Image: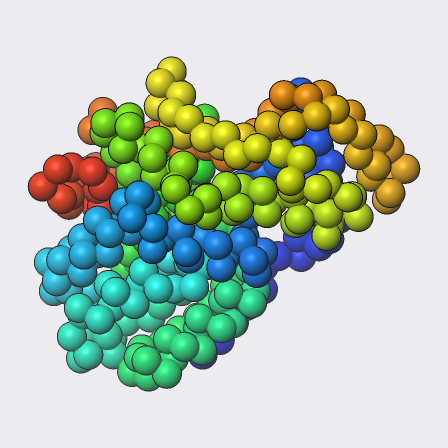
Amino acid sequence: MIIENFMPSTGESSVRDKLVAGLRSNPKTLPSMFFYDHRGSELFEQITRLEEYYPPRIEIPLLASTARKLAPDLKGCDIVELGSGDCSKISVFLDEVPKDVRATMAYYPVDVCKEAIEKSACNLNVKYPEMEIHGITADFLEHMEMIPGDRKRFFCFFGSTIGNLTKAKAMEFMENLGEVMNINDRLILGMDMVKDIDIIERAYNDDKGITAEFNKNILNVTNNNLGTDFDPDDFEHVAFFNREYSRIEMHLRAKKDLEIMIPVLNERVFIRKDEMIHTENSHKYTEDDIEELAAAAGLDVENVFTDERKWFSLVRMVK
Ligand code: AVJ
């Protein structure tokens, strides 16, 4: 098991810069990549078990059935998982691949979070000792070329994580990926599809308020990195479907006027009552969007693996 670090630029200061830039902008934003500190990852895990949050309930069995279909193609391949997190999704996938096939494969989890890579690479090493594991800590949006390309590769981007990118960023990501991919490399892209808006909105407004807590936790992350003293209770969780952009937007709405000091900069941020801090976009896709993303990357759509209601898709693309 090898772990390599390609994140020289991602020190504390770039985290601070991104948070400060968000608080200075108009409207204010806090980038969704900062949801996932220890507590945030725990809360997201709870979200995945919520009745209202349908995506994992569909994606997980879809990953298993898709893996069974793809298993014959996987011999001698490298699996590169972008934003691998705790590697739970790839486990569902690899469980369906015969051991003798796994023995010919290598797995490259790529994630910004060093701890996640270390921990999950260790777990997978125990689970699949026959398979080579090569963890990479990197921001895949910036360091895509760091991934070796001497064997046939399956790039995996599960969990509809691409949905967090604005359309322009998603197109740019696909273009870059298309450039990095070699002929016959594959991409498997998990995408949450457009469906009844009530169902989508409920998935981000659960009765137990876990999503609200997850959303507000970004203020704790901000406090920890900037030394600010945001009180999460001063904000209300807001999540709604924006039809124009075909996405769920999450915001934090201030319950009263606030003055927040950023000690490291000796700078004050003013927030008006009812002002919203935009924390996340989660895009929902149509079949046309799938084609458009493939075209941006110069890839062909080979298969769309989906459930009977077409709520979630795993799209296989080839160069
Ligand atoms: C992990 C980005 C796929 O957008 O549905 C869940 C994150 N945010 N509930 C999503 C999330 C609120 C999730 N992704």
Specify the quadrant that holds the N terminus. Answer: bottom left
Picture coordinates of residue 205, whole percent (x, y)? 40, 36
Picture coordinates of residue 55, whole percent (x, y)? 28, 45
Picture coordinates of residue 103, whole percent (x, y)? 25, 79
Q: Residue furthest front?
A: 207
Which residue is located at x 74 percent, y 24 percent? 257
Q: Which of 109 and 286 lies nearest the eye of the viewer?
A: 286
Specify the quadrant that holds the C terminus. Answer: top left
Residue 317 falls in image quadrant? top left
Picture coordinates of residue 105, whole percent (x, y)? 28, 71
- Seen in the picture, residue 108 relative to 23 is either above or below; the reply is below
Question: Horizontally, is 106 left or right of 176 in the view?
Answer: left
Question: Horizontally, is 318 left or right of 249 in the view?
Answer: left
- Seen in the picture, residue 104 relative to 191 is either above or below; the reply is below
Residue 31 is at least partly visible in this image: yes
Which residue is located at x 32 percent, y 45 percent? 53
Residue 285 is at least partly visible in this image: no
Which residue is located at x 40 percent, y 21 percent? 242
Q: Residue furthest top?
A: 244
Q: Residue furthest right?
A: 266
Q: Which of 79 and 149 lies nearest the eye of the viewer?
A: 79
Q: Which of 5 and 36 lies nearest the eye of the viewer?
A: 36
Residue 232 falls in image quadrant? top right
